[in-house]
Amino acid sequence: MYLQSTPYSITDSTSILTITANPPAYKMTVIEITSEEQFEEILRANQRVAVDFMATWCGPCRLISPVFKQLSEQFKDIVFVSVDVDKVAPVAQKYGVRAMPTFIMFKDGNKCDDMMGANKVGLEDKITGLAA
């Protein structure tokens, strides 16, 4: 039966069919920023934050995004966030983002490093430096 291989179960109790969903738990590793207030709160509440300033239409952004996600799973002491520059323009403007992708690292709410472009090795180095 198809449902046996999924995280769902079916029981039949006195001819009443009950379907129970037990979806697997997913941990969001990269937080998508939806407002300037949310971004500022994350900076205030966390010691280390890595930010990916991106756009959905940006090819290099789409290429480097899986690397950013993988790093978020590897470095648990860093909060990873993604800012769509078209949806949350005030945040991008505040930090002078002019090209995508741009990565900015924050320690204790202060900008400590940045990088423009989809350079995997460079991004890994910046994240490793932020973790140190």
Image (spheres, grey):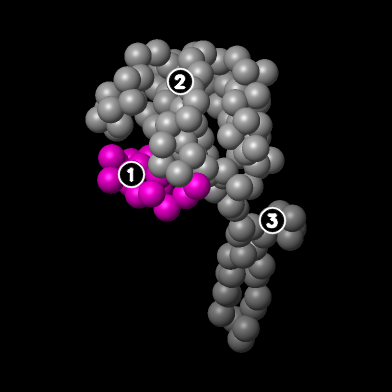
Give the residue number, with chain letter if any, for mark 2: 102
Dot 1: few (<14), some (14–19), or many (≥20) neighbours within 10 Å? few
Query: Which residue lies at the image location 57% right of the left edge and 43% below the top edge?
Result: 78
Q: Is residue 128 above or below residue 109?
A: above
Give the CA separation, mark 2 to mark 3.
39 Å
Horizontal and vertical percent position of residue 118: 56, 15
Horizontal and vertical percent position of residue 18: 57, 74
Disc on the earlier residue, 2 or 3: 3
Q: How many marks?
A: 3
Disc on the earlier residue, 1 or 3: 3
Magenta segment boundaries in residue numbering: 32-47
Element under label 3?
loop
Q: Nearer the viewer, residue 114 or 108?
A: 108
- The amino acid at mark 3 is Thr
Q: Are marks 1 and 3 in contact (CB under 8 Å)?
A: no
- The amino acid at mark 2 is Thr
Give the CA separation, mark 1 to mark 2.
18 Å
Indicate the quadrant where residue 20 lies: bottom right
- In this rendering, position of residue 96 left or right of residue 54: left
Is residue 60 visible from the viewing direction of this image?
no
Give the CA separation, mark 1 to mark 3.
39 Å
Disc on the earlier residue, 1 or 2: 1
Horizontal and vertical percent position of residue 62: 52, 21
- In this rendering, position of residue 67 left or right of residue 101: right
Give the residue number, with chain letter if any, for mark 3: 6
Query: Which residue lies at the image location 38% right of the left edge and 49% below the top edge?
Result: 44
Query: Residue 29 lies in magenta, yes or no?
Result: no
Is residue 81 visible from the viewing direction of this image?
yes
Magenta span: predominant SS is helix
